Image: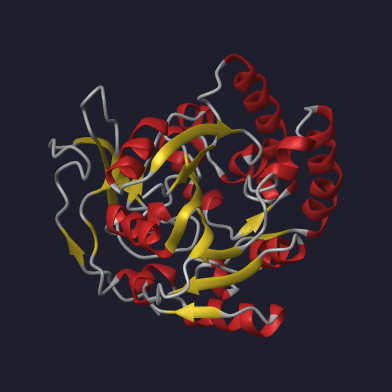
């Protein structure tokens, strides 16, 4: 049975500066989760911007069709590791963390860089499978989640007993504001990221902090894999950022003390799921739905290469990290 087509809308100009976009990658397909359609990514030509976005993009009414086989649904179509790949990854991934000196960075990453912040009330926007919320709860935070996906929300409630608001972020009551709001790989999925950050600003206490992670278009992985980079993920990733564009967005939303940096800690997974131009052309190998030992070895090699590159270029990490405060 063919998947139902996704309705689209034109999106020709840069969300941040209004410049007409230039085609970066045409003829993209969803090789990860099989959403229908062919997609185009554009890039802002302004040297002071560089935002990347989808044009045309799914409409708000139809975007849900792009998530029918998404990982939060635990669908059979989601890529799974073969038995041998799972064994090899179980050995190589922790080894790479130790050999490359990433243990401390990985600990901070897993606590979404709030490891030195006094625990209080915390909201995770787009809480997904709830693992991060459960981890933060064990660290002393009073946690709650927000989701628009009812399957994901029910999973978190049932597995972890954590309260999850089901519905758009703007429908959350701000009567009792939060000390921290976190979002990991969420901002790139929304049609209006500025409005989302403005809502986060409203939901925070004075001196509250926001922390977000998102794919970095200036990363070593993007430069290496181009159209096959895992971070692109059409048609679910609507806007893709670098440190500059992410800072501009947060400042427009009213945040102060904006800090951004990049991290290479997730490079293993990026290397494992990204594909070279030659692999993209081999459609027989592209959509097997399985992660093989070959993929896992690619991830290990890429983690090593990306970590070495990061020593020379601190902007080359696979993810951008932003921390900012609500001062007023």
Measured along the vertical axis of the image, is residue 113 above or below residue 6?
above
Percent from the top left, x then y, of residue 90?
Answer: 83, 49
Residue displayed at 68% across by 51% down: 111
Q: Is residue 277 visible?
A: no
- Residue 113, by quadrant, is top right
| Front-lying residue, 72 or 33 | 72
Residue displayed at 59% across by 42% down: 270
Percent from the top left, x then y, of residue 195?
Answer: 28, 58
Residue displayed at 36% across by 55% down: 197
Residue displayed at 75% across by 33% down: 102
Percent from the top left, x then y, of residue 275?
Answer: 53, 40
On the rendered structure, is 16 left or right of 78? left
Q: Is residue 94 visible?
A: yes
* Quadrant (top left, top right, bottom left, bottom right) of the N terminus: bottom left
| Front-lying residue, 199 or 8 | 199
The image's colouring method is: secondary structure
Percent from the top left, x then y, of residue 22?
Answer: 19, 34
| Front-lying residue, 300 or 262 | 262
| Front-lying residue, 249 or 303 | 249
């Amino acid at each position: 049975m063919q998947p139902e087509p996704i309705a689209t809308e034109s999106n020709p100009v840069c969300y941040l500066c209004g410049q007409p976009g230039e085609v970066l990658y045409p003829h993209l397909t969803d090789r990860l989760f099989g959403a229908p359609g062919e997609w185009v990514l554009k890039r802002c030509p302004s040297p002071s911007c560089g935002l990347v976005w989808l044009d045309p993009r799914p409409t708000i009414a139809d975007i849900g069709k792009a998530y029918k086989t998404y990982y939060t649904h635990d669908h059979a179509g989601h890529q799974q590791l073969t038995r041998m790949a799972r064994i090899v990854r179980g050995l190589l991934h922790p080894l790479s963390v130790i050999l490359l000196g990433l243990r401390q960075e990985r600990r901070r990453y897993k606590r979404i860089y709030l490891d030195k912040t006094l625990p209080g009330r915390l909201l995770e926007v787009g809480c997904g499978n709830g693992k991060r919320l459960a981890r933060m709860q064990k660290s002393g935070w009073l946690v709650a989640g927000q989701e628009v996906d009812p399957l994901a929300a029910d999973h978190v409630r049932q597995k972890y007993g954590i309260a999850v608001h089901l519905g758009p972020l703007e429908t959350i009551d701000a009567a009792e504001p939060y000390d921290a709001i976190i979002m990991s790989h969420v901002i790139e999925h929304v049609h209006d990221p500025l409005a989302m950050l403005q809502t986060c600003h409203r939901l925070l206490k004075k001196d509250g902090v926001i922390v977000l992670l998102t794919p970095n278009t200036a990363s070593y992985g993007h430069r290496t894999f181009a159209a096959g980079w895992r971070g692109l993920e059409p048609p679910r990733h609507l806007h893709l950022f670098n440190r500059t564009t992410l800072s501009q967005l947060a400042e427009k939303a009213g945040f102060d003390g904006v800090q951004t940096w990049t991290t290479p800690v997730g490079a293993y997974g990026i290397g494992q799921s990204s594909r070279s131009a030659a692999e993209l052309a081999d459609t027989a190998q592209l959509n097997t739905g399985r992660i093989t030992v070959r993929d896992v070895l690619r991830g290990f090699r890429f983690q090593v290469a990306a970590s070495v590159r990061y020593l020379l270029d601190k902007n080359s990490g696979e993810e951008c990290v932003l921390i900012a405060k609500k001062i007023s």
